[in-house]
Image (tube, rainbow, N blue to C red):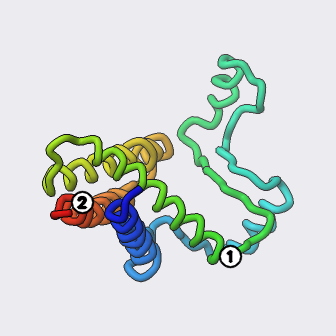
Amino acid sequence: MNTKTIVGMLVAAIIMFMWQFMSWSVLNVHATEFGHSPNQDKILTFLGENLEEGTYFLPHAPPGSSMEEAQKFMEPYMNKPWAKVQYNDSFDDNMGMNMFRGFTANLLAVFLLIWILMKIPSNNFVTTLLATLAVGVIAYINFPYINSIWFEGSSIAYLVDTIVQWGVVGAWLGWWLNRGS
């Protein structure tokens, strides 16, 4: 790996990391994902008494149900409330490890992106920018958008993240990777 790739990768990962920080905290782009209930203490107590740590889709047929059994089980719940619950036994705000893992994931994503970009013959600023945006849009469509379809949520904040962070990374890499040696 040459110096140009290493510098490009580090700066791009820092750009992504900084946008993610700004998006989730300072700019609060994801505010709709953190609703508040004045009954949260009662709800958490109830969940703690009735759930083990894990992710739940409620209502849901018991494990091992056949397709027919699952459909019959779900019939009485049609047009009634439902929930997707991520329940954890203990709140652990380990920001140091979370930030390390997030930055490492950004480094890996950018490394893979640069590997793809370096395979493009006659690469230039515009190609790099558009290819980078394409990679970001593919990632957005594949998870946040599809998830919003199935679980009836909004993915607009993730679309903003996609356009901003992958756009800025694409502009940086378009300039950095395509400038003179």
Res 121 quadrant in image: top left
Spot occupied by residue 122 in the image (x, y as percentages of width and height): 14, 44
Q: Is residue 127 left or right of residue 161?
A: left
Foreground pick, 136 / 129: 129
Looking at numbered disc 2 in the image, what kind of residue is underneath it? Leu
Mark 1 element type: loop
Mark sitting on residue 55: none
Q: Is residue 97 left or right of residue 162?
A: right
Spot occupied by residue 96 in the image (x, y as percentages of width and height): 63, 77
Quadrant of the frame with the N terminus = bottom left
Res 125 quadrant in image: bottom left
Mark 2 element type: helix
Mark nearer the viewer, 2 or 1: 2
Instruction: Determine which residue is flagged by label 2.
Output: 177
User: Which residue in the rendered view is the most extreme toward the right?
Assistant: 49
Spot occupied by residue 132 in the image (x, y as percentages of width and height): 28, 52
N-terminal label among 2 and 1:
1
Spot occupied by residue 127 in the image (x, y as percentages of width and height): 16, 49
Residue 114 seen in the current view: yes
Q: Is residue 118 left or right of residue 74?
A: left
Foreground pick, 167 / 39: 167
Seen at 61% across and 72% down, the residue is 37
Looking at numbered disc 1 in the image, what kind of residue is underneath it? Asp
Seen at 26% across and 61% down, the residue is 173
Q: CA distance from mark 2 to mark 1?
A: 37 Å
Instruction: Determine which residue is flagged by label 1.
Output: 93
